[in-house]
Image (cartoon, grey):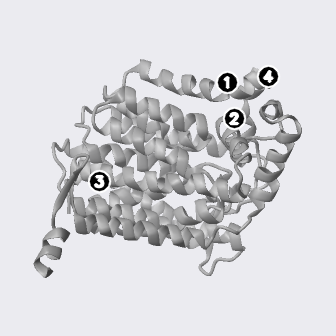
Amino acid sequence: MDNYLINLLHKEYKIGKMKLTFLHILFVIGITFTTLMMRYCLRDNETWDYFASWKPWVEKMREMGGFKGLSGDFYDYTPPYIALILLLSYLPMNLLYSIKMVSVIFDIIMSVISGIIIYDITKNRTKAIGIYSIMMLLPTVANNSALWAQCDVIYTTAILCAIYNLMNDKPAKGMFFYGIAFALKLQSLFVFPALIILWALKKIDLKHFLFMPLMYFIGILPAWFAGRPLKDLLLIYARQAAESPQLSLGYPNIYQIIGTTDFINVYPTTAIWLTLGFMMICMYYIARTKVEVSKVFVIKIFMLFGLISMCFLPFMHERYAYVIDILTVIFGFIYIKKFYIPLLQILISFSAYSIILSAYVNVPVIIYSFASLFLIYDIGMQIYRYVSNHSKEEKFS
């Protein structure tokens, strides 16, 4: 019996491109159950966003006749997610639970895709299973969906699908998924400069960028059919980008160093041009060479521009670094010796969560701001060395 059970544990099953033993499968099931129970414990928490946004928006739409409620201008999210929330409200369960349930399902999908990306790069199934486990355990991931009832994981999952396809020279599929991300969240534009670089290096054709307006237009069709003016729908992102009373809304970027309310009337526009200028320098340096675009290089440039956006753009909310959190963990599993990068980034992001959710953080926020600058330097120098040396291969350690 002992030999039979031991042999059973090591018996291999092919799942997709990966061969997993029965022990691997048991571990994945166990970690999934554990992390789902962790989220289950957070199910009853109701945050301000639920009271101020989701709940009143749904009530308003149902008063207006359900689907016709999409014609209103009281919500500032894009219609696809609002339509999903409306549909969830008709389920025979608590609306808060249903909203969280959708995000938790995407937690699993996002973690699986992270594992697929890692296996595609390293061919190491232990790392692939490991990153699935870590993603499901990440405090920012679990709190975003199960505690906060937010949907950042959905557009992030689309961006990961885009990266996976772009890494494997499938630009049409990659831009299709990026178009979905753009249709869901304005924050998807934080990594857009990486796509410009891939275009300059002939990894993306100009026609592939048409997926962005196409998917956005498809996404707003339900609200347009319901009666909301097309012009209003096209300007939703402009409304989201409206000025706020602080240069940083919880996230520890450079404005925590110089002051989040000082020069509030002049810094916002200046900061946007500063960030664009910084990005243009990076794009020019990388795009001017005919460097070989490796799979890891794609992840690095997405990380770099996400970090630059969060550090230098004004009005950054605490949750906007979600994509960066995920990309840094993927990076850390590729280069184990660089695992301090995801550790720092998660600490930075979770400090912002703490500030907003509990109005408390034990370490001075300015420390995290300097940590953000360090991460830009670290990733930037890695890209600089890679481009300078015109490396053909990268070694993993």
- Amino acid type indicated by mark 3: Ile
Q: Give the quadrant of residue 213.
A: top right
Front disc: 4 or 1: 1
Q: Which quadrant of the figure contains the N terminus?
A: bottom left
Where does label 3 land, which residue? Answer: 118
Q: Residue 163: in sight, yes or no? A: yes
**First along the sequence among labels 3 and 1:** 3
Q: Which mark is residue 3?
A: none
Front disc: 3 or 2: 2
Which residue is at the front of the view, 81 or 392?
A: 81
Q: Which quadrant of the figure contains the C terminus?
A: bottom left
- Amino acid type indicated by mark 1: Leu
Gap between marks 3 and 2, in whole Å? Answer: 33 Å
Asked if residue 393 lies left or right of residue 28, the reply is left
Where does label 1 land, which residue? Answer: 221
Extreme residue in the top direction = 207
**First along the sequence among labels 1 and 2:** 2
Gap between marks 4 and 3, in whole Å? Answer: 44 Å
Where does label 4 land, which residue? Answer: 229
- Amino acid type indicated by mark 2: Pro
Tell me what residue is drawn at x 10 percent, y 78 percent: 3
Q: Is residue 343 above or below residue 309?
A: below
Gap between marks 4 and 1, in whole Å? Answer: 11 Å
Which residue is at the front of the view, 296 or 213?
A: 213
Gap between marks 2 and 4, in whole Å? Answer: 13 Å
Mark 1 surroundings within 10 Å by alpha-carbon count, few (fewer than 14), some (14 through 19), many (20 or more): some
